[in-house]
Amino acid sequence: MKVEEGLNAPYEIAEHEKAIFKIILKWRRMESKSDLKVIAFDDVVKHNDTHDCWLIIFGKVYDVTEFMSDHPGGEEVLLAATGKDATNDFEDTGHSDSAREMMSKYCIGEIDTSTIPLKRMYIPPQPDRYNLDKTNNEFLIKILQFLVPILILGLAFVVRHYTKSE
């Protein structure tokens, strides 16, 4: 156990917690940058090609144009993440700590969350108002499914019987 200075107070932390603590402090330092400009979503969407590529990850805007040729997944992966919040894409890939640290040099601002369009939700169609109680119709259909074949057979029998006797 070591005593570390952090958050203005000394405390004891285990060795395995030290790395986690450093990462948290780095993220706090990144978040506390006051010189980051606020960028509208519509402005970010315009930067979506190999010569000018911006991504939104964790609420920050990153200009990854210089990194496109060096990205291990290729340019296509980065281009597929443009025009939307790419946080889930970034997290699902499982980036290393060094990749996360590298992000800070590409950060150019924060996204203006009020300009992000709302996700469209599927709204199921409403049932017909004229036919809210389907139990009567279902019962009638079941009876007709039984009676119609019997009536056809009966009619065929009657026609056969009368044509045979003449």
Image (cartoon, helix red, strand yellow):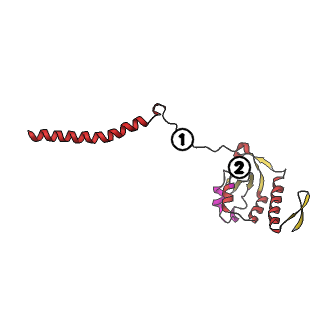
The residue sitting at 21% across, 40% down in the picture is 154
Most foreground residue, 16 or 27: 16
The residue sitting at 26% across, 41% down in the picture is 150
Q: Classify 130 as above or below 79.
A: above
Is residue 26 shown in magenta?
A: no
**Residue neighbourhood size for the residue with mark 1, other residues' Cα within 10 Å, grouped as few (<14), some (14–19), many (≥20):** few
Asked whether the residues under the numbered discs 1 and 2 touch, taking CB atoms below 8 Å apart as contact, a structural biologist would say no
| Count of picture labels | 2
Residue stretch rendered in magenta on the structure? 63-87
Where does the image place residue 140, in percent across and percent down from the top left? Answer: 36, 36
Given the image, on which type of amino acid does mark 1 rest? Pro
The residue sitting at 66% across, 59% down in the picture is 92
Where does the image place residue 65, in percent across and percent down from the top left? Answer: 71, 58
**Quadrant where the N terminus lies?**
bottom right
1 vs 2, front mark: 1
Name which quarter of the figure residue 9 lies in: bottom right
Q: To which residue does mark 1 refer? A: 124
Name which quarter of the figure residue 87 lies in: bottom right
Most foreground residue, 54 or 155: 155
Element class at badge 2? helix
Q: To which residue does mark 2 refer? A: 44
Which residue in the rendered view is the most extreme toward the left? 166
Is residue 67 shown in magenta?
A: yes
Where does the image place residue 57, in percent across and percent down from the top left? Answer: 72, 54
